[in-house]
Image (spheres, grey):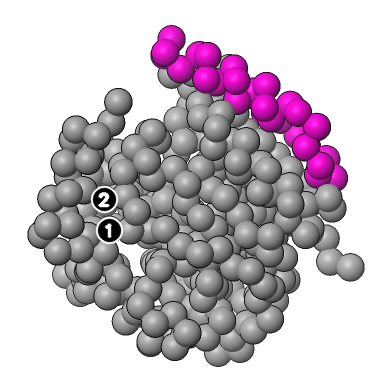
Amino acid sequence: MQTLAPIILFVYNRPKYTRRALAALEKNLLAKDSLLYIISDAAKNADAVENVNQVRAIIREPWDFKHITIIERQKNWGIAENVIDGVTKIIHEHGKAIILEDDLETSLYALMYFNDALIRYEQNERVMEISGYMYPVEHPKRLPKSFFFRVAGSWGWATWKRAWNHFNSDIEALTKHFKRKDIRRFSIERSENFWEQVKELKAGKINSWAIRWYLSIFNQEGLVLYPRQSMIQHIGTDGTGIHSDIDDAYRVELATQKVKYFPNDISEHKKAYEAIKHFYAHRKGNFAERLVRFLIKKFGRK
């Protein structure tokens, strides 16, 4: 039997979501046989101390995994540095890993999907990531049960050491040779704001590991496997996260069965590309829907 990939779970200061994430993960069909690493960031300020302590109590409960290793940061690292450091060290030891955050709820079949795909494409250099999340596109049944797309997923994903070795944190080096056509390809014909994120990172406005990982894959002409039905539900888009706003556009129905089909053709699926591009371009809705979302964001938080 192939060795199961270890799971890395990053947590911070949201006890309600941490409990939901762990409860869903524990129900996964391969959970009892999986190693779980939980990396808990320290409080950024005094206001976060109580919630961080609650989270650290929750992760020490007797969750049912093969073995749990808890790493508690003594100072606040932030999610970007936590992910880069944690993934690098653990994947160097194990050769592969499944990466989750505290605001992600998993399907019962998520670990099975990740592990099956990691085994299937282990030797294929062009496949650089397995994404667990899939966008709520229109007419999903027109797509195969799994397919390749160029964009790196950050809401539940898996990779190998051989792919993560290409990760580069230097944003200037990553974009040094970009031309206009590259920007267009990278931003999916400017349907999504990926290049705006690059500019914000260069300006020091954000510190994103995810956009640097996508750039690292893009520069290698790598591909990411996606499931037709999402294995991940993002439960943190209620405005409580460090980098999240209130947004229902990304809500999905979790997969209720195992993925049995994996493509042999290692190329981007054209219909999936068009479906996701359409989602990117229309996810904010019409003017009235955008106005409602803006008002909720501005005045709806307590």
Give x and y (percent) for residue 218. Answer: 39, 67
Identify the residue position indicated by label 2 in the image: 197
**SS class of the residue under badge 2?**
helix
**Residue span colored magenta:** 45-72
The residue sitting at the left extreme is 287
Question: How many C-alpha atoms fall within 10 Å of the one at disc 2: few (<14), some, or many (≥20)?
Answer: some
Residue 202 or 36: which is nearer the viewer? 36
In the image, which disc is placed on residue 48? none
Residue at 66% from the left image edge and 49% from the top image edge: 24
Relative to 120, does residue 231 appear above or below in the rendering?
Answer: above
Q: Amino acid at mark 2?
A: Gln
* Image spot of residue 216 (x, y percent): 43, 59
Let me know if residue 46 is in the magenta part: yes
Tell whether 234 sits left or right of 176. Answer: right
User: Which residue is located at x 68 percent, y 81 percent?
Assistant: 260
Residue under pointer 1? 194
